[in-house]
Amino acid sequence: MALTWTIIRWILLLVIFVNEIAAIFTVFREKRDIAATWAWLLVLTLIPVFGFILYAFFGRKLPHKRLELIKSQTRLKLKQALEEQKLQFINMPKPKDQTVQVYRRTIMLFQSIDDSFLTRHNNVDIFTEGNALFKKMFNDIAAAKRSIHIEFYTIYNDKIGNELRTLLEQKAAEGVEVRVLYDSWGSMGVRPSFYDHLREVGGYAAPFLMARSNFFDFRINYRDHRKIVVIDGEIGYVGGFNIGDQYLGRLPKFGPWRDTHLRIVGGGVYSLQRRFIGDWNASMKKQADKIFHYHPYFQPVRVRGNVALQTVSSGPEAPLEKIKMGYLRLINAAQDHIWIQTPYLIPDDSILDALRVAAHSGIDVRIMIPSMPDHAFVYRATQYYARDLANHGVTIYYYEKGFLHSKTMMIDGRMASVGSANLDFRSFKLNFEINAFIYSQTTVDDLEKIFVNDIRNSRVITPQMFADQSWWLRFKQTASRLLSPIL
């Protein structure tokens, strides 16, 4: 018996030794930031063998060829097409436009890192509730004459998902060009055959940059988290809503769904169109399925709105974390207040320090997060950072009327960001995201009124309330925080 236990101990020691060597090799063979490196080393070390299963889902990077595909398509040469149509909105703002003059450096930042044009004459509508959003969106789709381009992280096979598919099939049968790009993981449970009839009547549908099935490509990271709709090259939608019944408040688990989405008419649609074309071409294996003639999708601007904006996209194919840099720029430019809504508050050190500095500088920093979890580890990490920021003078709100999924940032009543990117590592480094950065006192005022109204459905969580939490809850928060670079 003693000999048997000795053999077992030696086997266990050998397994641990091999596991440690394999963990070091696995983590350090790919270039990644130091926080993620140590987080994965912790996982692989503390969870022998099974840690590698987690790594297979969460840790593997996209193949180099796929990153090159999306990178090459990001460099679509559309500037010439825009110039040929003499689109005046690409000019720098006029001196009399005070709001955009204040944020001139921010505008230049986005032009430099993302070739993002400032567009000054947009009409923008804000939607915070799914029924109103989808009614307007579906009406716009039904009125389409030339093209319908749709890109979502999630399109579910449920009531609203089937309503959209049926509408798209009708438009494709009418001869309208219909292209649907979806994330295979975000739309989990939806088989490729879901779009068979759409293809039969002349439409297109494909998963973003991935294999046809998650069975062959089961990475959970590096997902297409963008939400883009472009209709006839003239009307665009961007924001936080996906396509599914839960986004209409139909799932008891979440209750009413609180999100923020924009409808844009004007020059701002061009950047959404460009982003969709780049993502579509990168996802197509056949040359015949790609878009090569850009001009039909960039129609002359027919509106004279008063909202200036830029749309900025980011993803793991780029060396710069563009949207995060935008968030940093906004936070550091604030003079009076910073109001944020995010379902996931897991900032890296640069964002965390910027928020601390702002709060200690007397700036009114408010952050609203959900009062309920949809992912356990993510929610506990969010609570950890909320507790930290509360201790530095940031006002933390728990939104209690359903699930808060809105990703907004408002600065000084003059500038705002609305889009798909959360305030977390995943949106900064791992996912493909897109945000609209808005320079308009009127629109930002509307967003801030919405925030104030949401406060009525929230409660403030004070530093003392965080301190009074049970030791077990605080332990879970701290433990989850250790994994924050890979959540």
Image: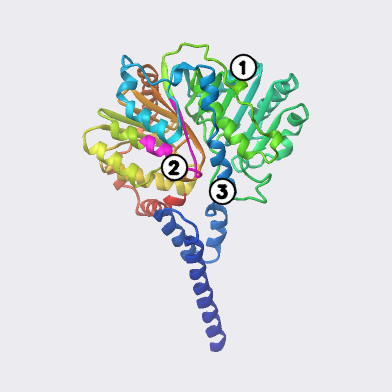
Disc 1 residue type? Asn
In the structure shown, which secondary structural element does the residue marked by tag 2 occupy? helix
Residue 164: where, in percent of width, then height? Answer: 66, 26
Q: Which disc number belongs to residue 386?
A: none
Residue 183 belongs to the span the image colors magenta: no
Residue annotated with mark 2: 428
Residue annotated with mark 3: 220
Disc 3 versus disc 2: nearer the observer: 2
Disc 2 residue type? Phe
The color scheme shown is: rainbow
What range of the chain is rendered magenta? 310-327
Taking the view exactly as shown, the residue that stands out farthest to the right is 200
Residue annotated with mark 1: 139
Q: Quadrant of residue 178?
A: top right
Q: Nearer the viewer, residue 429 or 110?
A: 110
> Would you place residue 17 above or below residue 262 in this image?
below
Query: Which mark is first along the chain, 3 or 1?
Result: 1
Residue 188 left/right relative to 319: right
> Would you place residue 210 above or below residue 460 in this image?
below
- What distance separates the C-alpha of mark 3 from that of mark 2? 15 Å
> Would you place residue 9 above or below residue 98 in this image?
below
In the structure shown, which secondary structural element does the residue marked by tag 1 occupy? helix
Residue 254: where, in percent of width, then height? Answer: 52, 35
Residue 323: where, in percent of width, then height? Answer: 42, 36
